[in-house]
Image (cartoon, grey):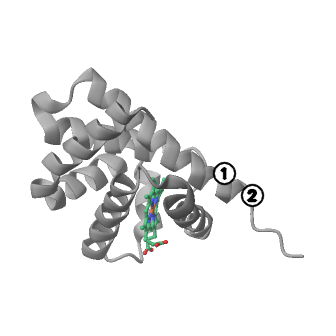
Amino acid sequence: MTPEHKQIVRSTWQQVTPIADQAARMFYDRLFELNPALEPLFADADMDTQRKKLLQSLGFVVNGLDDLEPVVVPVLETLGRSHVDYGVTDKDYDTVGDALLWTLEQGLGPAWTSEAEEAWSEAYTLVSGVMRDAAANPVQVH
Ligand code: HEM
């Protein structure tokens, strides 16, 4: 990602923060609208906690955009592997990406420029790519 795109992701994230919980609700509503089959995966989850975790993990990635390799990537790899146990499949990452970008578009209004869309697509592709790769490549036990 270019420094400009990282900056756009940071500044738009700041704009969403005041309405974060509402945005997280919209995100899950949109996700289950796009694919109702995903809702049962969250049957055991407390959605209040889940919304907080989603926001925390997104914030962690946004804040770590300059520190991906030593810090963020290993966390995402672990997260990607744990998602296999949650029943998440590779294509579900596309649906989550669509729901995320849609939510940002709603939340940001005029600040959702084509540049912002490009920057967030890159950020999500990066994050989901690390999770998907880790999910597809379990840790080797020697
Ligand atoms: C960028 C991508 C994603 C991020 C950052 C993310 C983040 C998280 C986090 C932080 C948790 C809390 C549990 C843990 O630490 O393992 C979690 C749980 C979970 N996520 Fe994701 N997730 C992502 C993608 C997805 C996708 C694509 C799905 C598919 C629908 C999904 C479904 C779930 C489910 C079902 C749980 C467990 C809920 C429970 O039973 O407690 N996530 N996710």
Residue under label 2, please give it.
137
Q: Position of residue 108 (x, y in %)?
A: 15, 38
Secondary-structure class at tag 1? helix
Disc 2, SS: loop
- Residue marked by disc 1: 133
Which residue occupies 29% across, 62% down?
55
**Looking at this view, is 112 or 32 the one in front?**
112
Q: Quadrant of ligand 1?
A: bottom left
Q: Is residue 51 left or right of residue 89?
A: left
Q: Position of residue 32 (x, y in %)?
A: 35, 51
Image quadrant in which the C terminus is located: bottom right
Vertical arrangement, residue 123 with respect to residue 110, above or below: below
Residue at point 41%, 34% (across, down): 121
Image quarter where the N terminus lies is top left
What amino acid is at disc 1? Asp
| Residue at figure coordinates x 40%, y 51% from the top left | 36
Location of residue 77 (image quadrant)? bottom right
Kindly indicate whether the residue at mark 2 contacts the one at mark 1 (C-beta within 8 angstroms).
yes
The residue depicted at 56 percent of the width and 65 percent of the height is 83
Amino acid type, residue under disc 2 in the picture = Asn
Q: Point out the residue furthest to the top here.
A: 114
In the image, is 142 to the left or to the right of 47?
right
Question: Does 104 appear above or below 132?
Answer: above
Residue 2 at what x, y percent from top left?
42, 32
Q: Quadrant of residue 139?
A: bottom right
